[in-house]
């Protein structure tokens, strides 16, 4: 099945509202709307920037999706500091990153937390971008395929094929995030193919065939084309390079 690539920018904890609006506007100014007939594009700014960024793209009639970087699984209540799926949906979010390695490692997010978030997002009609990926120690130990596929199984526990079909998985080897050390296309493809095989075991080959598996980890305008040429890599989750409009737009072009 022909899958349409998704290029998603993870802005992390960068950009005040004013800076976020400028960056969104710069992206919009460089964008030809018909590109979105060939590739899906999203940006994931910090929570406070979400609505202002949605407004920029809406004003320009540009269907770039906006996604959050985190969510809490409960609907409402005494959960100080958290944001619900309903809140994200109301401001126009269509994606939400879940289980990024920074959240797993710095904020102790577990596979169980990731699963609760995935299920809440699917129930609330927001597409999860589920991040999985091994540390350098796991890669060196040679057990990375088992490790990553176990993360995929845990993230989708209790989810059926119909619910899973619009979810996205992003393979992000921790050793490649923000380090400038990109996985080779062969290394990335090996794991993305294993992720898809796991999705096929969970949801059947047809559903797995239609689901997008992204690569993330120091992807930039210089290496995107080769990574995206791999059969099981259906786009990229881009950190650093998504903070520069020109670089982000070049990656989008490479994905068409
Ligand atoms: C990320 O954090 O999702 C990421 C891929 O970052 P970078 O592109 O900067 O490695």
Image: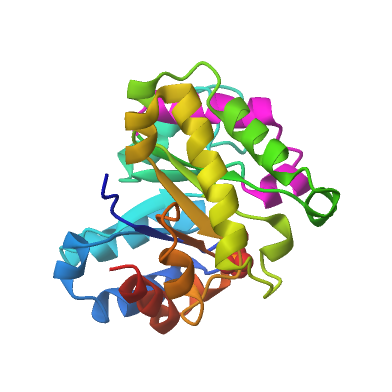
Task: In this rendered view, identify the residue nearer to me: 107 or 184.
Answer: 184
Quick check: 93 left or right of 44? left
Residue 207 seen anywhere in this rendered image of the structure: yes
Task: In this rendered view, identify the residue nearer to me: 62 or 189.
Answer: 189
Q: Is residue 18 above or below residue 112?
A: below
**Magenta stretch in the rendered image:** 100-125
- Magenta stretch holds residue 195: no
Q: Quadrant of residue 250?
A: bottom left
Q: Quadrant of ligand 1?
A: bottom right
Quick check: 130 left or right of 31? right
Q: Is residue 65 above or below residue 254?
A: above
Q: Quadrant of residue 65?
A: bottom left
Tell me where residue 95 appears, x and y as whole percent: 39, 45
Give the residue at x 31% y 75%: 253
Image quarter (top left, top right, bottom left or bottom right) of the N terminus? top left
* Number of callouts: 0
Residue 79 seen anywhere in this rendered image of the structure: no
- Magenta stretch holds residue 105: yes
Task: In this rendered view, identify the residue nearer to me: 129 or 207.
Answer: 207
Tell me where residue 55 appears, x and y as whole percent: 27, 60
Quick check: 36 left or right of 211? left
Q: Main secondary structure of the magenta part?
A: helix
Give the residue at x 35% y 74%: 254
Tell me where residue 165 appears, x and y as whole percent: 35, 32
Q: Is residue 120 above or below residue 216?
A: above
């Amino acid at each position: 099945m022909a899958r349409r690539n998704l290029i998603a920018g993870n802005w992390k904890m960068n950009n005040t509202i004013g800076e976020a609006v400028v960056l969104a506007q710069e992206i919009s100014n460089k964008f030809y709307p018909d590109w979105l007939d060939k590739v899906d594009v999203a940006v994931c700014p910090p929570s406070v920037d979400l609505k202002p960024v949605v407004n920029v793209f809406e004003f320009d009639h540009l269907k770039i999706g906006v996604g959050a970087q985190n969510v809490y699984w409960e609907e409402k209540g005494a959960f100080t500091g958290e944001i619900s799926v309903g809140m994200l949906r109301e401001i126009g979010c269509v994606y939400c990153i879940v289980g990024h390695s920074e959240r797993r490692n710095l904020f102790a997010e577990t596979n169980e937390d990731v699963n609760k978030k995935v299920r809440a997002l699917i129930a609330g009609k927001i597409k999860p971008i589920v991040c999985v990926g091994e540390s350098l120690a796991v890669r060196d130990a040679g057990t990375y395929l088992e490790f990553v596929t176990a993360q995929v199984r845990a993230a989708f526990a209790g989810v059926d094929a119909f619910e899973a079909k619009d979810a996205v998985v992003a393979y992000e080897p921790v050793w490649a995030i923000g380090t400038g050390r990109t996985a080779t296309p062969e290394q990335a493809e090996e794991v993305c193919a294993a992720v898809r095989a796991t999705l096929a075991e969970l949801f059947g080959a047809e559903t797995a065939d239609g689901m997008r598996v992204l690569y993330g980890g120091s992807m930039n305008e210089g290496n995107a084309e080769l990574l995206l040429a791999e059969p099981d890599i259906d786009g990229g989750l881009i950190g650093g390079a998504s903070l520069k409009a020109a670089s982000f737009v070049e990656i989008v072009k490479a994905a068409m």
